[in-house]
Amino acid sequence: MSLNINAADSVIVFDLDDTLYSEFDYKVSGIHAVCAQLAELYPQYSATDLLALLDTHKSDWLDRLCRHCGLNDAEKASLLWHYRLHRPAIRPYMPSENLSALIQRFAASALISDGRSLTQHLKLKALGLSGCFDHILISEAFASEKPQPERFDFIRKQYPGKTWIYIGDNIKKDFVTPNNQGWLTIGLKASANNIHQHDAADFPATHQPRCWINDLTEIKDLLC
């Protein structure tokens, strides 16, 4: 499939979580970091034993961990920040040098991601992607979350007259605004471990991307 995209006259913009890497891998990395921290500070626990208590696919892992260790809500909050600020062990879906080479074919590039600024920048550093983008627009820093339009407006004003392309995964929020604004939207199909699982059939046409891809390497096949 080709969309005949002229990269030299287009701005390519990516989501981050579950688009450039697996967010589930980040979650597992954070859980390991929290268990290791507890084992380091409280010798009666081992990281291996703590991990064995947890189901990393469930959302209540921190509650379960705190109950087991007898930690109160304030201590739980400290562990949550340790999770958010740990240095993640994650890998990009596409090797960073390959993604960088692809991005350089375009007139400009950006990242539009929801999340906490420090957390998202730590992810980018771990992925080797910190220097890949002309603009990194994180919701916390921009005081705007998808599908709010502010960050998409910013890109359009910075690069008027270009073809704007947004690549994401979350059909609930990623494509609504760029679709409304005339962007070309591309959806990365979800893997089995995606944090946010949505059935595309449950959403109207306004939420659907122009096309779906199975892998980021397919982007080059959409170029003319």
Image: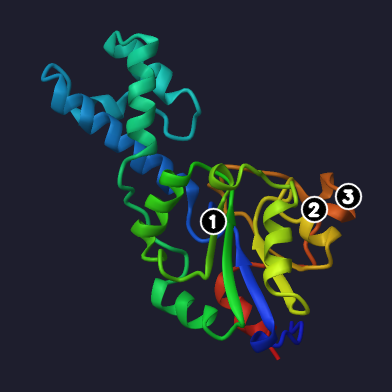
> Which residue occupies 39% across, 11% down?
73
Mark 2 vs mark 1, CA separation in Å: 17 Å
What is the number of callouts on the image? 3
Find disc 3 in the rendering and name its residue.
204
11 in relation to 139, above or below: below
Of residue 68 and residue 74, the one placed in the foreground of this image is 74
Apparent side of residue 151 relative to residue 98 in the rendered image (left or right): right
- Quarter of the image for the N terminus: give it: bottom right
Of residue 104 and residue 92, the one placed in the foreground of this image is 104
> Which residue occupies 72% across, 84% down?
5
Give the mark, 3 or 2, whose residue is nearer the N terminus. Answer: 2
Colouring chosen for the image of the structure: rainbow
Residue 96, by quadrant, is: bottom left
Find disc 2 in the rendering and name its residue.
176
Q: Amino acid at mark 2?
A: Val
- Mark carried by residue 16: 1
- Quarter of the image for the C terminus: give it: bottom right
For mark 3, give the secondary structure.
loop
127 in relation to 194, above or below: below
Mark 1 vs mark 3, CA separation in Å: 23 Å
Give the mark, 1 or 3, whose residue is nearer the N terminus. Answer: 1
Q: Amino acid at mark 1?
A: Leu
Give the mark, 2 or 1, whose residue is nearer the N terminus. Answer: 1
